Image (cartoon, rainbow, N blue to C red):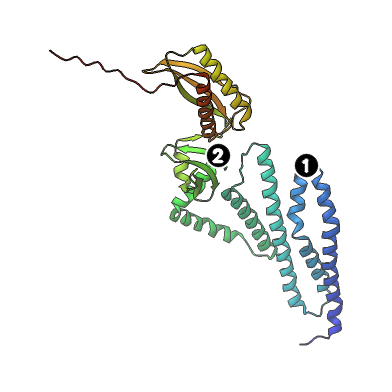
Amino acid sequence: MAFPLDQWLSPLIVILGATVFGLIFKVVVHSRLSKIAEHSKWEGDDVIISSVESQIVFWFFLLGLSLALKDTPIPDQYALYVGNLLSILLIASITHASAKLVVGLLELWSKKQGGGFPSTTIFTNIVWITVYVIGLLIILDNLDISIAPMLTALGVGGLAVSLALKDTLSDVFAGLHILLSKKVEPGDFVSLDSGEMGYIQNISWRNTKMLERSNNLIHIPNTKLSTAIIKNYDSGDPSFSVKIPLGVSYNSDLDHVGQVVMEVAKELHDSMEEVNKDAEPSFKFRAFGESSIDLAVYFRGNKYGDQNPIIHEFIKRVHKRFSKEGIDIPYPVRTIVQNSDQ
């Protein structure tokens, strides 16, 4: 059945006008709101504006379709289907924007709480899926489809799936336990009781990615990580003590040695970014060694890995300064006395 063109002209104008108005609203009103939000102290308004930005034109387009539907020469039975389709599209769009909004607001809340819910793959995926499932249930209810049998079927099916995917679900819940307990977080440098050391990259559904300092990527099952003994170098205060052993000749003037060592240590403390400025360097004589008087110099690094450049630079500088001051660093010497029977 054909319809005259003039009967479609008015609905098309309404749809086109609503879409153009949506574009103008996004360019003018939304952009100005974004600039205002950038200067506000509350970061939540930035999240809200960013969440709806991609949907503004689409919402005005759906509004135009809804208004034009009344004037289109479509039979009532088809108009009902089109109306239901518009409702589905609108709810789906709002669900998508709501998911972005919830994830963004929870990330802001997480930062204020000190990282209680870090932004990792497993966490963000759970939030996305939860909001999408709620949106799907709203769509089904809007279409007068009873969701009670579906929930019952999901309950029975979920039991079967949980038995079949026992290991996978164990990793999922272990990952949630790791996140909520703050045992490790993305960016932390950790060492495991099995010997692996590296930076935590991400915590996904089944595995935690750890990047070694040699740039090798290790995938650790979440259940293994949750039960492992972990040394976390970045939890709490990431700074740590750097000990540098040293030995001088027995003929050395120990007061002079101490003065030179502290001068070199303070120069290093003031010039290197890796050295923690809140902790002064120190040294202690440790023992009478086999061929030298042993001492140790102590610095405080900002984080794990800073000890390498600190040790490297201190050895260079103290060796040069000892040579200039005439302080001897002896070679290991051992005297062996042998008695022979005559």
Left or right of 90, for residue 256 = left
Q: Earlier in the sequence, mark 2 or mark 1?
A: 1
Residue shown at 47% from the left, 37% from the top: 191
Q: Nearer the viewer, residue 214 or 261?
A: 261
Residue 259: image location, x then y, percent: 56, 16
Residue 318: % across, % down: 52, 25
Q: Disc 1 designates what residue?
A: 42
Q: Position of residue 180 (x, y in %)?
A: 57, 40
Q: Along the line of sight, which residue is nearer the eye, 192 or 245?
A: 245
Q: Is residue 88 left or right of residue 27?
A: left
Q: Left or right: where does residue 156 sit relative to residue 48?
A: left
Q: Residue 206's spot in the image, x, y percent? A: 49, 50
Q: How many marks?
A: 2
Instruction: Classify the position of the N terminus by image quarter.
Output: bottom right
- Residue lying farthest to the bottom in this orientation: 1
Q: What type is the residue that disc 1 sits on?
A: Trp
Q: Secondary structure at mark 2?
A: loop
Query: Is label 1 in a helix, a strand or a loop?
Result: loop
Name which quarter of the figure residue 147 lies in. Answer: bottom right
In this rendering, is residue 71 above or below 138? below
Residue, x 77% and y 42% (percent of image)?
42
Amino acid type of the residue tagged 2 in the rendering: Asp
Residue at the image position 83 percent from the left and 80 percent from the top: 8
Q: Quadrant of the C terminus?
A: top left
Task: Evaluate if marks 2 and 1 touch, with contact meaning CB atoms under 8 Å apart.
Answer: no
Look at discs 2 and 1 and give the one toward the viewer.
Answer: 2
| In this view, 50 is above or below 294 | below
Would you name the residue on which mark 2 appears?
188
